[in-house]
């Protein structure tokens, strides 16, 4: 943290404006989340009170009970875990090998292939929904876990390769050369030496992939129309598009969906933000 | 000693094959689909059918408005937040984490929560604004013809300005402190430092971030689809939603493919122009 921090004494006016700006920032970022949490523990009549109450007068867990025992949300939660987890593993395995290839070898066509991987990240997903749908239907993968896991690879693989490649470039080659002299194969070097050293990068990629897939909406909308594979975002959208929206239930389900990713993200925040910004600033 | 295929190529081959199958093949297949009719005969009609109706132009206009309007405020607010978060003050790391919340919250959750807050009768926003007499009475934010797009843009800005903030913050931390010390010697004020040192130094980061925001913006479906589904009366319809509806509500796969191709070309041109124009601007500025 070599920030351009001036530790000199500030004028009172400067300190007040910093405090005000920080408080405004906190309120802007936190208020919708707080309102969601408060709404999720209000009773239905209280939610539909004019004027609205800031704090619930009779806090209740009834909305959570509805979500957990009287809806499909638990099933969708499980589906989301399986699909996001599966897509993360597939993308990670492919990205580890590809990043090692990009970081450690020179070969013809490498710049072209690297550009291709990056372009994959730039592609508007809406533009390929139709052919993907037809292809998956032909492969009988619509409404299956594998179908969504495969299409999610498109979203997560390019950036995973990008982040891991820049991480592996930062690992000294000398360590690998020593192992090669000792007779280790290329694959052995990757798995036993480079991969363990690249663990922080791997964790960043895993968190990024999992959170991205967990939140993904459009592909899930198209490729998972059956209850047995629907994911949480779709379940949540279903909740709120009926004519009489159960706002308490929606807010409780929103909490159930948000808390796991928020915890995961905050736990690995430093690592993840570091990996992402390193890719951007060092190029 | 040397085999015909480089070992490096073998390492990247699986990823490339998967990406070819899932990206290159669908792109080519879309072009093919857009040129045939439902019976498989060659035709140019799909493009004509897609281009003719007013709704296509309207959706595209809305998309440009949505992306452009969002980016301006995302970059300004994100940069201001980054400048604040780079200052030294008590509780800074906590404020940094809190700033990330909008970005971490799933898009669909942001959509439902803001829809509830903007609710005409029971929403907290109408209550706060009407209670303080900023507005005379409750406003139907998401159903009003003049309010629906600005509100959607505001929600989108809220969702993504933290991303700009963390990226710019990383750029700020890479600025050598000697530059600021020299400016202090010359008696520069805080805002002079921001204008003459900080902004020029983080310009490459801003360029990269804006490009990402353009791409994400062109791709955005979740917020608008979950909140308005393009309504009222197509006022918030954007091209990606139009493609989705053509394909999966009207089942016009070939027309949807034609629109996809057009959208793809326009998106590619925008990104290419951006990549070409912006860096030369920077060179010129130097």
Image: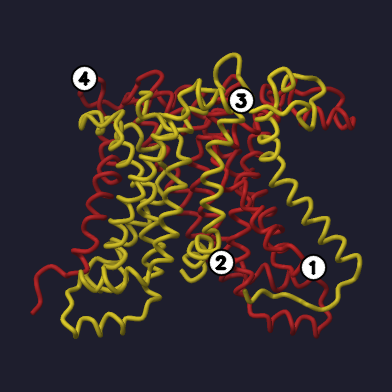
Q: Quadrant of residue A164?
A: bottom left
Residue at which label 4 appears: B39
Looking at the picture, how far across and down is residue A80, in whole percent? 41, 37
Residue at which label 1 appears: B191
Looking at the picture, how far across and down is residue B86, in whole percent? 69, 67
Q: Tell me if mark 1 has few (under 14), some (14-19) or many (20+) residues whose alpha carbon lies within 10 angstroms of its own.
A: few
Q: Chain of mark 4?
A: B
Pointers 3 and 1 within a single chain = no
Q: Is residue A110 visible?
A: yes
Judged left or right of residue A205, residue A91 is left
Chain letter, yellow in picture: A
Q: Which residue is pictured at 18% across the width and 77% down the height? A: A184
Q: Chain of mark 3?
A: A
Q: Which residue is pictured at 17% across the width and 74% down the height? A: A185
Label 2 with label 4: CB-CB less than 8 Å: no
Q: Viewer-nearest of labels 3 and 1?
A: 3
**Label ID, residue B204:** 2
């Amino acid at each position: 943290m070599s920030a351009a921090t001036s530790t000199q004494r500030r004028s009172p006016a400067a300190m007040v404006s910093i405090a005000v700006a920080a408080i405004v920032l906190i309120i802007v970022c936190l208020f919708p989340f707080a309102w969601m949490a408060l709404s999720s523990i209000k009773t239905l009549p209280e939610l539909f009170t004019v004027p609205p109450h800031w704090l619930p007068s009779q806090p209740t867990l009834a909305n959570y009970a509805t979500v957990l025992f009287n809806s499909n949300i638990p099933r969708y939660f499980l589906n989301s875990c399986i699909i996001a987890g599966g897509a993360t593993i597939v993308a990670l395995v492919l990205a580890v090998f590809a990043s090692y290839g990009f970081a450690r070898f020179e070969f013809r066509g490498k710049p072209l292939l690297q550009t291709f991987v990056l372009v994959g990240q730039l592609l508007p997903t809406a533009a390929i929904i139709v052919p993907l749908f037809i292809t998956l239907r032909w492969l009988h993968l619509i409404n299956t876990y594998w179908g969504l896991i495969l299409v999610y690879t498109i979203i997560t693989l390019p950036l995973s390769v990008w982040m891991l490649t820049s991480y592996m470039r930062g690992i000294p080659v000398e360590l690998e050369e020593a192992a090669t002299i000792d007779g280790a194969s290329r694959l052995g070097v990757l798995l036993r030496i480079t991969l363990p050293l690249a663990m922080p990068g791997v964790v960043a990629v895993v968190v990024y992939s999992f959170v991205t897939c967990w939140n993904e909406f459009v592909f899930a909308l198209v490729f998972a129309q059956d209850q047995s594979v629907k994911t949480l975002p779709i379940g949540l959208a279903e909740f709120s598009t009926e004519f009489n929206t159960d706002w308490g239930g929606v807010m409780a389900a929103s909490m159930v969906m948000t808390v796991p990713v928020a915890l995961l993200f905050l736990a690995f925040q430093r690592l993840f933000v570091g990996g992402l910004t390193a890719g951007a600033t060092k190029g | 000693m040397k085999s015909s295929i480089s070992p490096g190529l073998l390492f990247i081959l699986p990823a490339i094959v998967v990406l070819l199958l899932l990206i290159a093949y669908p792109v080519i297949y879309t072009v093919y689909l857009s040129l045939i009719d439902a019976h498989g005969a060659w035709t140019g009609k799909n493009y004509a059918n897609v281009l003719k109706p007013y709704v296509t132009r309207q959706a595209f206009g809305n998309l440009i408005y949505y992306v452009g309007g969002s980016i301006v405020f995302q970059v300004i607010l994100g940069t201001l937040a980054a400048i604040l978060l780079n200052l030294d003050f008590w509780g800074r790391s906590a404020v940094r984490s809190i700033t990330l919340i909008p970005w971490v919250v799933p898009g669909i959750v942001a959509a439902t929560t803001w829809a509830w807050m903007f609710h005409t009768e029971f929403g907290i926003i109408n209550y706060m604004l009407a209670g303080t007499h900023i507005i005379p009475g409750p406003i139907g934010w998401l159903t009003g013809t003049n309010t629906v797009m600005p509100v959607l843009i505001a929600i989108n800005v809220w969702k993504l300005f933290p991303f700009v903030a963390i990226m710019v913050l990383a750029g700020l931390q890479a600025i050598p402190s000697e530059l600021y010390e020299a400016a202090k010697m010359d008696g520069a004020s805080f805002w002079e430092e921001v204008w003459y040192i900080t902004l020029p130094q983080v310009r490459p980061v801003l360029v990269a971030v804006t490009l990402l925001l353009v791409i994400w913006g062109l791709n955005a479906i979740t917020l608008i689809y979950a909140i308005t589904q393009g309504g009222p009366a197509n006022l918030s319809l954007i091209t990606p939603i139009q493609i989705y509806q053509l394909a999966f509500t009207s089942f016009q796969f070939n027309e949807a493919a034609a629109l996809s191709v057009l959208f793809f070309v326009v998106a590619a041109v925008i990104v290419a122009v951006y990549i070409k124009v912006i860096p030369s601007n920077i060179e010129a500025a130097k």
